[in-house]
Structure formats: structure tokens, C-alpha cells
Image (spheres, grey):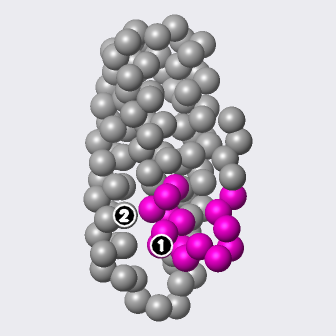
Amino acid sequence: MSVPAMSPAVDPWSAAEERCEAALAISRQVLARLQDDSAPNELVAVLRRELDQVRLLGDAVSQLSKVQSASPAPFRDRLASQLGELLKLEDQNHSLLTRRGLRLSYAR
């Protein structure tokens, strides 16, 4: 499943929020698959999609560092909340993966 690129006209804060929402959605799918005790091949497929989304989110967040103006508080606060939720989901997913005896390899 390919992910469309953000339009250049989209401001970087909105783009980061959209990417974070996409990462949250796929992380929720990972959690659902883990809770449903899905087959490893199904997990691998959804984990790969999650990795793609997280990379896109990282790109969007890095674009924020290039923004010259001050961050708008509502966008910043929403994004911070979304990122916090994403981290909690990732912790849950990692714990469930570990309990199932699945090991993930991380890029160094």
C-alpha cells in the first residue's frame, strides 16, 4: 500500500499531524492483530506498513525544524498529544510482541 505524498501547499504542521494520525492508525492495527493472535506473516505485513508510516512521520517532523515562524500552539499541542499516544501504543505493541516471543531487529 503506497502512501501519497503531502501536497507542497500543505503547511508543515498540518502535514506532521496527518502523518502522525496515519502512524497512529497503523499502530492501532498492529495492536489489534496482536490482540487477535494473528499469524506472524500478517504481523510482518502490518509492521512493515507501520515502519513506512513512522519514517514518513519522521520526515514530516524534520520539516518542522525548517519552519521559520514560531510554532502555533494548537498545532504543537495536538501533535505532542498524538506523539505521546503513539509512544504508548508502541510500548504496548512491543510488550505484546515480546510476550509472543517475536523479536524485532532495529536499524542501528
Type of amino acid under label 2: Leu
Specify start and end residues of the magenta stretch as a single range: 5-19
Q: Is residue 60 above or below residue 41?
A: below
Q: Is residue 5 above or below residue 51?
A: below
Q: Between 95 and 84, which is closer to the camera in this rendering? A: 84
Marks 1 & 2, CB-CB < 8 Å contact: yes
In which quarter of the view is residue 42 placed? top right
Residue located at (57% from left, 40% from top):
51
Q: Is residue 94 visible?
A: no
Q: Is residue 36 above or below residue 2?
A: above
Residue located at (29% from left, 42% from top):
88
Q: How many labels does the image show?
A: 2
Mark linked to residue 65: none
Image quarter (top left, top right, bottom left or bottom right) of the C terminus:
top right
Q: Is residue 26 visible?
A: yes
Residue under pointer 2: 79
Q: Is mark 2 on a helix, strand or loop?
A: helix
Type of amino acid under label 1: Trp
Residue located at (59% from left, 50% from top):
55
How far apart are labels 1 and 2 at the CA level? 8 Å
